[in-house]
Image (cartoon, rainbow, N blue to C red):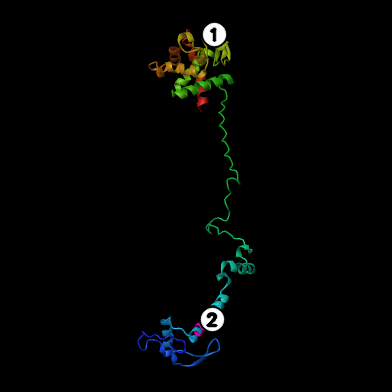
Amino acid sequence: MRDDGTIDDQPAPEGTTGRSDDITSSVQVGVFGETVATPSLRTRLGGLANPLIRGPRRVALAAGVVSCLGVAAFAGVQSLPADRLDPVDARPALAERAQEDPASRSMDRPPITATPTTPAAASPTASPTPTATKKAKPKAKPKPKPKRIAPVAGLDEAQMDNAKAIVKAGRKMGVPRQALVIAVATAMQESNLYNYASGVLPESQEYRHQAIGWDHDSVGLFQQRPSSGWGEVGQLMDPEFATEAFLTVLLTIPGWQDLPLTLAAQAVQVSAFPDAYAQHEWRATEVVDAILS
């Protein structure tokens, strides 16, 4: 043992025991006021490599270094911002900063104007929405009024209406004009162009009629008899059905177009007065021409 309290490192080889610490490069005042020699760099490294080396001077130097590091660490901690401190200790500081610099969410902001998606070239006038403007309903076109045809050939309104019904039914069937003249002339002879019911058949009077006859069971404009197979009473009281029944039989007569009107009508009606139809030919022709014009 040396007199300075340092234990010699006997087993260590010469030059590696750190004895160079007896050689001072300069004199410094220690932490406790004593004068100590500043060891060289080699001495410092040797002391760190040999932890068994102890001594008053080394203890004092180590204490001084620790003290300096503590002061530096404390200063560093003081210099850190409040949000880098311990979360518990930093709460007052963070609250103070929040009061000084409140979040921008509480600040007044200018209103945001949405950017229009409509191109600039679009029409400046916005089209009305369906709820804003009621769509006008298209006006219904008025139904065309039927053409009024003034009575001709000495007929009254009822007779003229029945003549128009005969012509309308014949055109629906597509018959030629000559067949229409024959049908009108026959109705003039048989019923004077009035829709007759029969006194013998009370059932016929339940339908629209303009006169009542007593010629057996003959009914309608053509005085067709249900008992002869022309049709049912209600059917024969209909001017359209009665006309179709007459023209259907007329078209079955061979060469009817070349026959005199009275013979063509008689071939259908089989009347007791076969020549009576001829007297109505000119009037029937005038009526048909007035209706077709």
Q: Main SS type for the magenta part?
A: helix
Give the image location of residue 190, x and y in percent. 51, 12
Q: Residues within 10 Å of mark 1 (few under 14, many from 20)?
A: some
Magenta segment boundaries in residue numbering: 60-69
Q: Residue at x 56, y 19 (%)?
A: 159
Q: Is residue 227 magenta?
A: no
The three-letter amino acid code for the residue at tag 2 is Ser
Q: Is residue 256 above or below residue 67?
A: above
Residue 67 disc label? 2
Q: Is residue 137 left or right of residue 185?
A: right
User: For this rendering, which residue is in front, 104 or 269?
Assistant: 104
Q: Secondary structure at mark 1?
A: loop
Q: Secondary structure at mark 2?
A: helix
Q: Is residue 67 magenta?
A: yes
Q: Is residue 124 above or below residue 177?
A: below
The three-letter amino acid code for the residue at tag 1 is Leu
